[in-house]
Amino acid sequence: MYPNPSDITRTTFANGLTLLVRENHAAPVAVLHGSLAAGAAQEAPEQAGLASFVASMLSRGSRRYDFDAFNAAVENVGGNLTFGADTHSTSFGLVCLQEDFAALVDVLADALRHPAWPRKHVEQVRRQRLVDLQERDEDTGSMANLRFYEALFGRQHAYGRSTSGYRETIKPLGRGDVQTFYQSFYTPSQGVIVVTGDVEAQAVIDLLGDKLGDWQGPAAARAMVQPPAVISTTPGRMVVPMADKVQADIVLGVAAIQRDHPDFYALRVANSILGQFGLMGRLGARVREEQGLAYYAYSSLAADLVGGVWTAAAGVSPDHVEAAITSIQEEFARIGAEGVSDEELADSQAYLTGHLPLTLETNEGVASTLLSMEWYGLGLDYLLRYQELIYGVTRQDVQRVCAEYLRSDRLLTVVAGPNTPS
């Protein structure tokens, strides 16, 4: 039986933090996943990467656990405690044996509530970030993807800039910037924590209530930014010259929808047919297998709180750039004009619904799924409705969204690599 309202305990503390607990006593393991409504959407464009920087500092020391004590507390019990940030959230994850759960929740709570921001570690994190960004800027796939979002939405919008930042925005960041962001935006309000595994629901509620229930912070909103406007002149083309590379990477696509849009499930099924199912759908079959134009070719749908994109990506020999772009565009046009077969629809629906039980086989998979359900307001019965939502998509729905969204006059194409014609 999928997780559902009968076996998920949901509690919201007075400070606005929501807790979901699902017991699973099959193995003596406890898993915690959480998100706070503090992310890149709150940072200024000239400080791009600050939210991610702050999240990286949470494991560098707190009021009661300095850097060494933090690592000892986690590693000595074979646990794992991580932090990260994306556009709308700061995330954290904890995995450990059930017997060590309470002790590591104490470490987690102190890191969230009382970070110390050691100056030495601020400098270390900055140096590591600059190295990571240099490596990113030398990767054709990363640069094609980065420039696609920038060209589509612009760096003034959170959806149009890198959540990791840029070398010119990371270099000036100091301890004061980190502290100010934390004090301004870190809050339990609108936050979500999910705990699964060999735990007792009431004990978890008591534990998290004791450690985080009296935490106070500013009011928050998960979707605090306006939907992004497309700023590129489409159809558009951008070239990112990278002369010392042997491969070119292509990203082409369109602005799409937010997660709660009525077209989401039709687009999800359409995306599976176009570039996911089997050997990466029609794109993989046509561009890679039949024509031999690409090392890889697939499509992806990203739908976040206030907007999203629908893209195709391919890695090709520089000599095949134009042919690969033409082939992908032809597949876009064909699926919009001709639709899909009954067999394609049935296969992708079976894939999307059949994959779900595999996702829920582990406590981490359950925790991640429940966190997404709560974050996007899908309801505790979402997994019970999921099959109906996917099988409710018709061939007509697929053709309609493909024709509507994958229009040639909306396409933006970015190519990163050597000898790439504009």
Image (cartoon, rainbow, N blue to C red):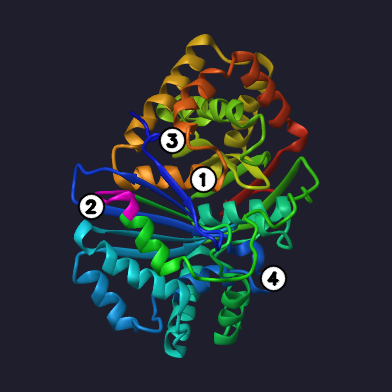
Residue type, numbered disc 3: Pro
Q: Secondary structure at mark 1?
A: helix
| Crowding near the residue tagged with mark 1, few <14, some 14–19, many ≥20 C-alpha atoms within 10 Å | many
Cα gap from disc 4 to disc 3, whole angstroms: 40 Å
Q: Which mark is residue 269?
A: none
Residue 28 horizontal/vertical position (percent) = 18, 51
Q: Nearer the viewer, mark 2 or mark 3?
A: 3
Tag 2 secondary structure: strand
- Kind of residue at disc 4: Ala
Res. 294 in view: no
Helix, strand or loop status at disc 4: loop
Asked if disc 2 and disc 1 are in contact, CB closer than 8 Å, the reply is no
Residue 318, image x, y percentages: 54, 46
Residue occupied by mark 4: 44
Task: First in sequence, mark 2 or 1: give its number.
Answer: 2
Q: Give the residues in magenta.
A: 196-202
| Mark 4 / mark 3, whichever is N-terminal | 3
Q: Nearer the viewer, mark 2 or mark 4?
A: 2
Q: Nearer the viewer, residue 237 or 320?
A: 237
Give residue 38's position: percent from left, percent from top.
58, 64
For label 3, the SS is loop
Q: Which residue is mark 2?
A: 29
Q: CA distance from mark 2 to mark 3?
A: 22 Å
Mark 1 against mark 4, which lies toward the viewer?
A: 1
Determine which quarter of the picture holds residue 359.
Answer: top left
Residue at horizontal 38 percent and vertical 56 percent from the top? 205
Residue 374 circle label: 1
Distance between the alpha carbons at the discs numbered 2 and 4: 40 Å
